[in-house]
Image (cartoon, helix red, strand yellow):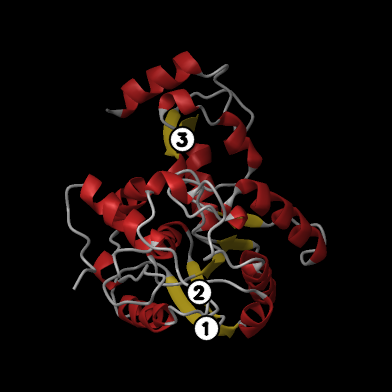
Amino acid sequence: MNDSIVERIAFANLPSNICALSGQPIRDAAVMHRDLSDWWPSALLDMRDERICNLLIVERQVRDDYYAKLKRVGVVLAFSGGLDSTTVLHWCIKVFGEVHCLLFDYGQKHAIEIDLAEKYLHNLMQEDGLGCAISFQRVDMSPINAMAASALTRDDIEVASCRDVDDMAKDIPDTFVPGRNVYFITALAQAAYTRGWRHVSMGVNVLDYSGYPDCRPEFLEPMRQALAVGVFNGQDLGVHAPLMFLNKTQIIRLGLHLGVQYEATHSCYNGVTGGCGTCDSCILRRRAFRELGIDDPSIV
């Protein structure tokens, strides 16, 4: 579908031709895809129209200026080396001028993810022409393990296996680590403040996830407001969650477009190289690759 057709569909469905970014009438229309746009400001959410496949129509120059501004600043990313966070890493590289990754070590059973995440970043940093500076640090989050009982933090709690996809979001699974994302987003905000930045990013989403309550907009928005007040003294904080409304298949399709090396990513809750194939994360991941007609390249 070309831009002109998309624009006609959009204008036929939207209540007006006012650009959400500028508040002015659109004269030179351009398409913004939600999976390639900033989750904030709220004006973009207000303009989202599910009937036109989550495409936004905005003023072309305003859109270009918006992205040019982001390319001049940095973002702090929660990076685990998994499918979601690696996709967001490549999204951040495309959108921002600098990305600083925090790798959180909270004594998780699948701690292999941290080593693989470091390896991925080291390899990526050797590539030419990224157009983005990358740095990272490992962060000790052991208090999470001490305070939160979870299948990911306790050997005596087994990771659920072979669950039906439809059952995964019906209740909160034992792999939920209560408070984990509270710690994570707070650390992201601290790191951003230290660098003089006001942008953080996470790979959370509400589709094809394991029922975690701290992966939803209802969690991120109050946290964004609290951190803007308590850390940035009332200045706005950009919380970027570009995968929020994408399912796993859409995430992988986006990642392939952005150049993600999925064979080097790790998602298994049991910490098995190539995946155990039975935990929720492995099931969702492998199903998504099958829907795209390709094998999961991480399987050994």
Q: CA distance from mark 3 to mark 1?
A: 37 Å
Q: Which residue is mark 1?
A: 137
Between 39 and 112, the residue placed more toward the observer is: 112
Q: Name the residue located 33 percent from the left edge and 57 percent from the top edge.
A: 283
Closer to the chain start, of discs 1 and 2, is 2
Q: Secondary structure at mark 3?
A: helix
- The amino acid pointed to by label 1 is Gln
Q: Percent position (x, y) of residue 210?
A: 48, 55
Q: Which residue is mark 2?
A: 101
In this picture, residue 27 sits left or right of residue 200: left
Disc 1 and disc 2 in contact, CB within 8 angstroms: yes
Q: Name the residue located 45 percent from the left edge and 72 percent from the top edge.
A: 80
Please rate how many residues cluster around mark 2, counting C-alpha atoms within 10 Å: few if below 14, some from 14 to 19, many from 20.
Answer: many
Can residue 217 be seen by looking at this rendering?
A: yes
Q: Secondary structure at mark 1?
A: strand
Closer to the chain start, of discs 3 and 1, is 3
Task: Please give the label number shown on residue 60.
Answer: 3
* Snapshot quadrant of residue 123: bottom left
